[in-house]
Image: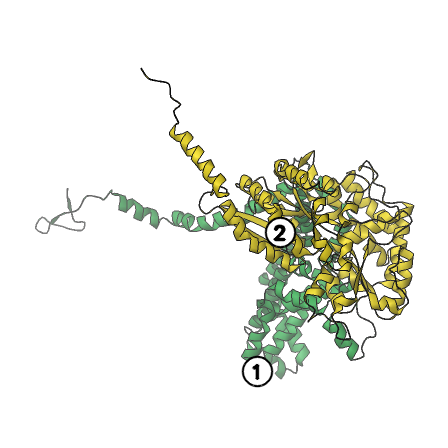
Chain colours: A yellow, B green
């Protein structure tokens, strides 16, 4: 008679020992030989941030048992790249997205709630802005990665020379200050061309601060053609003529960095990259006296106040996993790995405040005690960001309007001589095609 | 089987030769097939037809389908008839892009033709280093457009333009010229760059045409007292007209559908004032992901180009007939 014994099948044994091996080695199982995880990100304005990620790639490859390949492209080329990848059903497994792009590509993205939720909970919660950018229909379609805040970088000494010790608080004050500086050949520099970063992060808050908006709170009714918008446009026409470098109409996101470093402009809305690059290249970037330019750079947080208040639109960055990807699980594992404190922290510190964390936990990081005073403005900047479509929801329609540069072009038309009323009317026509068409 | 040899006569001369059986084996059939002109033509044409089908016909049919559908990135879409075309026509940016494309093509072609002709006439003369000059003239045509346009972009840069610097230093201007920050300037900058890039193609082709003209004709015209202009107008131009028309047709097609140059130089800005149909179609279809609308904008180029090419080729045929 056979005695009942607890028999372990060969399959159970293999499973059990395999899992034990993973647990003891602290390593994920190796994927099929030759498996590659392809990640597309922008070319960072802080070159060291990309260097750090490249340095981490072999570590990630080792931990995940698959080759992690990073590709960095111009961020104005990200959207065309996404379209091509989605339509051809092939390309990178993970693509970095800005603003609320996940809304526009929602049908092609993997639900990442099982990755994003635990990270958010463990790190004190994501900034509110991500609720409207990375979350679509109650699901996290992207894992928030960071927020690039912006502030006005300005030349302290040049402002002091005309008696300005504190940066102007209102738009009208800035116009007056800018007028004096432009008269001395030191204009304000602002990009108003077709570029994904600086032109929209300036134009939208300016519009909101005068009480203008694309749509109402429902996000369905176009309200751009309003008295407030026209006021904003009239202000911009005067500000442009009096205070700005009019070449800004052809600028992209790199132009103001170069112009500032070359001593061509007195102030510009930008991320911390102007300061950080000047600091890290002190031997190259100098002022007219031959002193390191970084010593003369100050930051004013938030654009000035308008009649309706003070607003900011920062750039949230998030990672998405594409539905066509054959490595979806691996991609999720990579994102979990990337957000482990030990790995994320290194990238975060290299940024020195240019990109802050996606969760509030990083506001308390010891790095903030060490960073220079002008960079401290970025510490809690992400708390204040509004998003495309404000005051309505940040829908795919808002992304479409942003991608077509309608608000940016409305201001660009106005400063080129189109009457403020006509520019607002033009924008209304274009927006109605998107929201009500 | 034994058969008498044809032509044999008389019994004495009658020879009987054993002939082989007609061959019905595989190689014979293959040889016959290979000798068939129809089959050979089919075999030779098949790869070309397949390639054309894959890379020309399929994308074209796909483009037509997309233009009639509401397809957007990640969404299959449905048939919407001519809605995308109507939407495009009611779009002020599309109308600007259409006008810009026509303006850009017209002036760039005129400039390329006149300067190309002038250059070809110069190069048709004998001088030292002629071969070197001819070869170096092709440089703008050889350098990748994106690369050369980047160089031009630096020269037209709103802040660091070397041209502005030069003009300012020589006292020609007192304030910077808004090369790329003004729509009109921007479009003319693009026309200049296009002319610079496309002129060698005109010059080399026209030069080839010039060299087929018999010098005796010029000599005869000179003896009859014709001056340089008359010789050009009554001898050179009529003989060069067919070549010129072909070059102009090619140039119009290339210029009307130009993308790279504007994309790199201005990106369609400022405020869409330099968009061409191709760059606007790209912005709507690829960047914004509205593939149906983008395809419709792109396809509006087809009838325009078709009419232009048809008129010119008809004229060319008439010239041939004459």
Which chain letter goes with mark 2?
A
Q: Which residue is mark 1?
A: B126
| Front residue (pair B277, A409) | A409
State the quadrant of the C terminus of chain B: bottom right
Q: Visible in this render: residue A288? A: yes
Residue A389 quadrant = top right
Whether residue B113 sits left or right of residue A6 in the image: it is right
Name which residue lies at 62% across and 76% down. B121
| Front residue (pair A76, B313) | A76
Figure check: A133 above or below A14:
below
Name which residue lies at 56% across and 80% down. B130
Q: Are marks 1 and 2 on the same chain?
A: no
* Residue B277 point in image, percent of width and height: 70, 53
Q: Residue furthest left?
A: B12
Q: Visible in this render: residue B182? A: no
Name which residue lies at 51% across and 45% down. A64
Q: Secondary structure at mark 1?
A: loop
Q: Nearer the viewer, mark 1 or mark 2?
A: 2
Q: Which residue is mark 2?
A: A41
* Residue A430 point in image, percent of width and height: 79, 45
* Residue A428 point in image, percent of width and height: 83, 45
Distance between the alpha carbons at the discs numbered 1 and 2: 56 Å
Residue B188 quadrant = bottom right
* Residue B273 point in image, percent of width and height: 77, 57
Is label 1 in contact with label 2 (beta carbons under 8 Å)?
Answer: no
Residue A276 quadrant = bottom right
Whether residue A337 sits left or right of residue A432 in the image: it is left
Which chain letter goes with mark 1?
B
Q: Is the residue marked by circle 1 packed among few (<14), some (14-19), or many (20+) residues within 10 Å?
A: few
Q: Secondary structure at mark 2?
A: strand
Q: Is the residue marked by circle 2 packed among few (<14), some (14-19), or many (20+) residues within 10 Å?
A: many
State the quadrant of the N terminus of chain B: top left
């Amino acid at each position: 008679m056979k005695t009942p014994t607890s028999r372990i099948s060969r399959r159970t044994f293999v499973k059990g020992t395999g899992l034990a091996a993973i647990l003891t080695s602290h390593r994920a199982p190796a994927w099929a030989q030759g498996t590659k995880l392809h990640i597309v990100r922008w070319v960072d304005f802080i070159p060291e941030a990309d260097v750090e990620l490249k340095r981490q790639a072999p570590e990630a490859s080792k931990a995940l048992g698959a080759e992690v390949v990073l590709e960095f492209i111009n961020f104005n080329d990200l959207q065309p790249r996404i379209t091509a990848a989605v339509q051809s059903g092939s390309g990178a497994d993970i693509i970095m997205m800005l603003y609320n792009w996940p809304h526009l590509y929602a049908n092609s993205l993997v639900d990442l709630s099982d990755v994003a939720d635990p990270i958010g909970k463990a790190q004190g919660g994501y900034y509110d802005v991500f609720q409207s950018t990375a979350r679509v229909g109650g699901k996290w379609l992207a894992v928030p990665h960071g927020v690039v805040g912006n502030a006005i970088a300005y030349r302290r000494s040049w402002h002091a020379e005309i008696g300005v010790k504190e940066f102007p608080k209102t738009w009208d004050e800035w116009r007056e200050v800018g007028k004096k500086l432009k008269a001395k050949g030191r204009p304000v520099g602002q990009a108003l061309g077709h570029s994904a970063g600086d032109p929209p992060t300036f134009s939208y808050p300016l519009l909101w601060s005068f009480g203008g908006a694309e749509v109402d709170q429902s996000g369905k009714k176009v309200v751009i053609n309003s008295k407030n918008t026209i006021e904003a446009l009239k202000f911009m026409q005067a500000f442009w003529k009096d205070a700005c470098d009019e070449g800004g109409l052809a600028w992209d996101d790199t132009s103001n960095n170069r112009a500032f470093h070359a001593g061509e402009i007195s102030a510009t809305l930008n991320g911390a990259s102007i300061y950080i690059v000047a600091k890290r290249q002190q031997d190259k970037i100098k002022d007219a006296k031959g002193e390191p330019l970084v010593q003369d750079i100050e930051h004013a947080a938030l654009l000035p106040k308008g009649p309706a208040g003070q607003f900011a639109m920062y750039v949230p960055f998030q990672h998405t996993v594409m539905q066509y990807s054959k490595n979806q699980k691996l991609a999720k594992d990579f994102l979990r790995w990337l957000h482990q404190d030990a790995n994320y922290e290194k990238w975060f510190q290299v940024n020195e405040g240019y990109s802050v964390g996606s969760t509030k936990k990083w506001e308390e990081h010891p790095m903030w005690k060490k960073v220079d005073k002008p960079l401290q403005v970025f510490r809690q900047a992400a708390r204040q960001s509004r998003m495309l479509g404000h005051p309505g929801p940040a829908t795919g329609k808002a992304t479409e309007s942003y991608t077509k540069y309608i608000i940016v072009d409305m201001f660009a038309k106005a400063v080129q001589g189109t009457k403020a009323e006509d520019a607002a009317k033009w924008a209304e026509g274009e927006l109605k095609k998107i929201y009500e068409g | 089987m034994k058969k008498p040899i044809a032509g044999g006569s008389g019994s004495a001369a009658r020879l009987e030769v054993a002939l082989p059986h007609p061959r019905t084996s595989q190689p014979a059939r293959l040889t016959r097939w290979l000798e068939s002109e129809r089959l050979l033509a089919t075999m030779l044409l098949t790869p070309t037809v397949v390639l054309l089908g894959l890379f020309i016909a399929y994308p074209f049919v796909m483009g037509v389908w997309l233009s009639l559908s509401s397809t957007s990135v990640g969404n299959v879409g449905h048939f919407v008839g001519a809605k995308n075309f109507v939407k495009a026509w009611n779009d002020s940016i599309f109308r600007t892009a259409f006008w810009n494309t026509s303006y850009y093509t017209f002036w760039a072609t005129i400039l390329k033709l006149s300067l190309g002709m002038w250059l070809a006439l110069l190069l048709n003369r004998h001088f030292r280093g002629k071969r070197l000059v001819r070869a170096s003239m092709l440089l703008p045509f050889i350098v990748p457009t994106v690369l050369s346009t980047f160089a031009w972009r630096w020269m037209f840069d709103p802040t660091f333009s070397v041209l502005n610097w030069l003009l300012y230093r020589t006292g020609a201007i007192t304030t910077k010229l808004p090369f790329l920050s003004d729509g009109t300037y921007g479009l003319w900058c693009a026309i200049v760059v296009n002319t610079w890039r496309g002129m060698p193609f005109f010059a080399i082709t026209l030069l080839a045409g010039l060299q087929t003209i018999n010098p005796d004709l010029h000599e005869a015209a000179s003896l009859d007292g014709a001056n340089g202009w008359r010789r050009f107008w009554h001898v050179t131009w009529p003989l060069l007209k067919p070549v010129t028309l072909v070059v102009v047709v090619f140039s119009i097609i290339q210029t009307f559908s130009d993308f790279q140059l504007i994309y790199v130089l201005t990106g369609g800005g400022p405020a869409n004032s330099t968009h061409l149909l191709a760059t606007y179609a790209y912005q709507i279809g690829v960047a914004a992901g509205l593939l149906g609308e983008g395809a419709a904008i792109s396809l509006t180029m087809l009838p325009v180009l078709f009419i232009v090419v048809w008129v010119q080729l008809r004229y060319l045929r008439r010239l041939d007939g004459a």
